[in-house]
Image: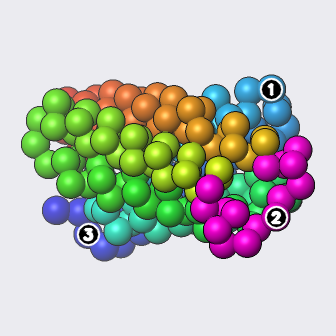
Amino acid sequence: MISKTNKIVYSSLLLAIGIVFQIIGRNIPQINQFLVGPIINSILILTAFICGRWWGVGVGTLTPLLAWFVGQLATPLAPFIPFIILGNLLFVLVFSLFMEGDLLRRATGIVLGALAKFAFLTFASTKLIKLVGFNFPPKIAKVLATSMSFPQLITALLGGALALVVIELLKKRRVI
């Protein structure tokens, strides 16, 4: 059992790694979404697995806010941050239902969590924002809808796969 102090330290370390990659992604916009996205999604899963679901929820809440603060998330997309947070929470919470057990069970949690995140963010970026009264300019709305659809599924699946590899390596080395 990991102590609460260690969970704080591990969660903070994983969050710090995420911030570093967000800063790198901000400075290299060509690879931004497909480098930063999988790494952040991997960090969400690793935090949930190592420290527990609520620590994963905390990191999933902070990463979009910090992406905006460091400039990795474009300023016009700031009103969409709560939806990104909810997408991250769906990913973490669905995964956490399957994280106990074998690799196949965890992989199932990754796939279902990625699908839940993808479905929610696609719905939120195309329909929900209109229902809640956000009026993004057409160009920004198009970029938002594009970036919050299939790329989210791809980055969540890639990040989840990376997290599963890291989890298996850590378990093999008896670190966790």
Q: Which colour assignment does the render follow? A: rainbow
Query: What residue is rendered at 26% in x and 69% in y?
Result: 3
Residue 150 in the image: above or below residue 41: above
Q: Main secondary structure of the magenta part?
A: helix
The outermost residue toward the left is 101
Depth check, mark 1 against mark 2: the one in front is: 2
On the picture, is 173 further left or further right than 82? left
Tell me the CA gap for discs 2 and 3: 46 Å
What range of the chain is rendered magenta? Answer: 127-141
Depth check, mark 2 against mark 3: the one in front is: 2
What is the number of the mark on residue 135? 2
Residue nearest the viewer, comparing 77 with 38: 77
Secondary structure under the numbered disc 1 in the rendered image:
helix
Residue nearest the viewer, comparing 145 with 75: 145
Tell me the CA gap for discs 1 and 3: 40 Å
Query: Which is more N-terminal, label 3 or label 1?
Result: 3
* Mark 3 lies on residue: 3
Find residue 114 and report its image quarter: top left
Tell me the CA gap for discs 1 and 2: 27 Å
Residue type, mark 2 in image? Asn
Q: Position of residue 94 (x, y in %)?
A: 30, 53
Q: Position of residue 28 (x, y in %)?
A: 82, 31
Residue 131 in the image: above or below residue 56: below
Query: What residue is rendered at 65% in x and 52% in y?
Result: 125
Residue type, mark 1 in image? Gln
Query: Which is more N-terminal, label 2 or label 1?
Result: 1
Residue type, mark 3 in image? Ser
Secondary structure under the numbered disc 2 in the rendered image:
loop
* Mark 1 lies on residue: 30
Magenta span includes 129: yes
Q: Position of residue 135 (x, y in %)?
A: 82, 64
Q: Position of residue 160 (x, y in %)?
A: 39, 36
